[in-house]
Image: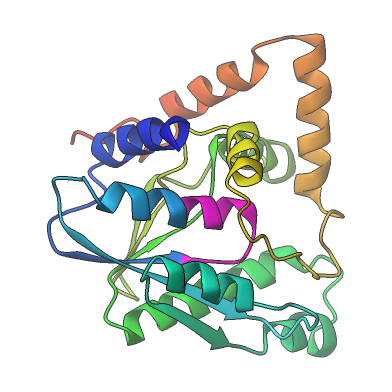
């Protein structure tokens, strides 16, 4: 847990993510990243000097063959309030719209549904599981496929929803999350999405692995370049 807590706390404090009395929701997909965020935040809550309330929300997107009961048990064991929000996202994306590139639409629908679910429970900040590798991959995706320098930010306020998105794992590498998930035997729920593993992001992940073998340290250099150029990363003290 310590190799998650230290960099997570660094991100929380560097970007002023949590204020006294905040009501936080972790978007719990069932993947290793969101489970690790929830476990780490639960551990942090026990000793962090800033008091906050913590809940978990899972979106049931109608994929089928996804059993969320292990997530419910995980939350119950830690006395974390847990909500499953049913949606028709799978039907909209794959059946009605029949999207050839479904990930962007699905992501937008998921964000909207998660934020609405949080607001309905009186929660004002939503924690997502994006980590160090996600940052670099998103930066490259924007550069190579959109022709712009862009990336999500550690803290994002959505004025239309009056919800703030937090990404406390931005300094944690995926390999460390994977190691923690295995050692802590997190109850990961297999993703049954038809597009899982067949995306541009999956290609970028493979490309980065190859580049890292050829030129060690490329992830760190890309992360530094992104942090120096993307607004919201280099003005946290403004």
User: Residue farthest to the front?
Assistant: 77
The answer to which of 29 and 124 lies nearer the viewer is 29
Q: Is residue 32 shown in magenta?
A: yes
Q: Quadrant of the C terminus?
A: top left
Q: Is residue 97 above or below residue 141?
A: below
Question: At which x and y percent is residue 195?
Answer: 84, 64
Q: Is residue 87 shown in magenta?
A: no
The answer to which of 88 and 57 lies nearer the viewer is 57
Q: Quadrant of the N terminus?
A: top left
- 58 with respect to 63 (left or right): left
- 232 with respect to 61 (left or right): left
x 82%, y 81%: residue: 94
x 84%, y 22%: residue: 210
The answer to which of 237 and 75 lies nearer the viewer is 75
Question: At which x and y percent is residue 171?
Answer: 46, 32
Q: Is residue 28 above or below residue 222?
A: below
The segment highlighted magenta reads 27-37
The part of the image, by quadrant, that contains residue 186 is bottom right
User: Residue farthest to the top?
Assistant: 215
Q: Is residue 10 above or below residue 69?
A: above
x 73%, y 87%: residue: 92
């Amino acid at each position: 847990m310590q190799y998650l807590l230290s960099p997570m706390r660094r991100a929380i404090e560097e970007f002023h993510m949590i204020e006294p009395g905040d009501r936080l929701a972790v978007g719990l997909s069932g993947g290793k990243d969101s489970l690790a965020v929830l476990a780490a935040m639960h551990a942090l809550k026990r000793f962090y000097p800033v008091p906050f309330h913590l809940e978990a929300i899972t979106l049931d997107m109608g994929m089928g063959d996804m059993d969320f009961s292990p997530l419910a048990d995980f939350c119950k064991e830690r006395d974390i309030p847990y909500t499953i929000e049913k949606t028709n996202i799978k039907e909209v994306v794959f059946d009605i719209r029949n999207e050839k590139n479904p990930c962007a639409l699905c992501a937008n629908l998921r964000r909207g549904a998660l934020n609405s679910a949080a607001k309905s429970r009186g929660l004002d900040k939503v924690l997502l599981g994006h980590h160090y590798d996600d940052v670099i991959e998103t930066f490259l995706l924007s550069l190579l496929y959109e022709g712009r320098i862009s990336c999500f930010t550690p803290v994002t306020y959505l004025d239309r929803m009056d919800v703030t998105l937090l990404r406390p794992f931005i300094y944690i590498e995926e390999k460390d999350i994977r190691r923690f998930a295995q050692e802590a035997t997190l109850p990961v729920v297999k993703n049954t999405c038809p597009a899982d593993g067949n995306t541009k992001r999956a290609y970028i992940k493979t490309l980065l692995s190859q580049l890292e073998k050829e030129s060690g340290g490329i992830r760190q250099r890309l992360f530094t370049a992104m942090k120096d150029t993307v607004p919201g990363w280099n003005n946290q003290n403004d």
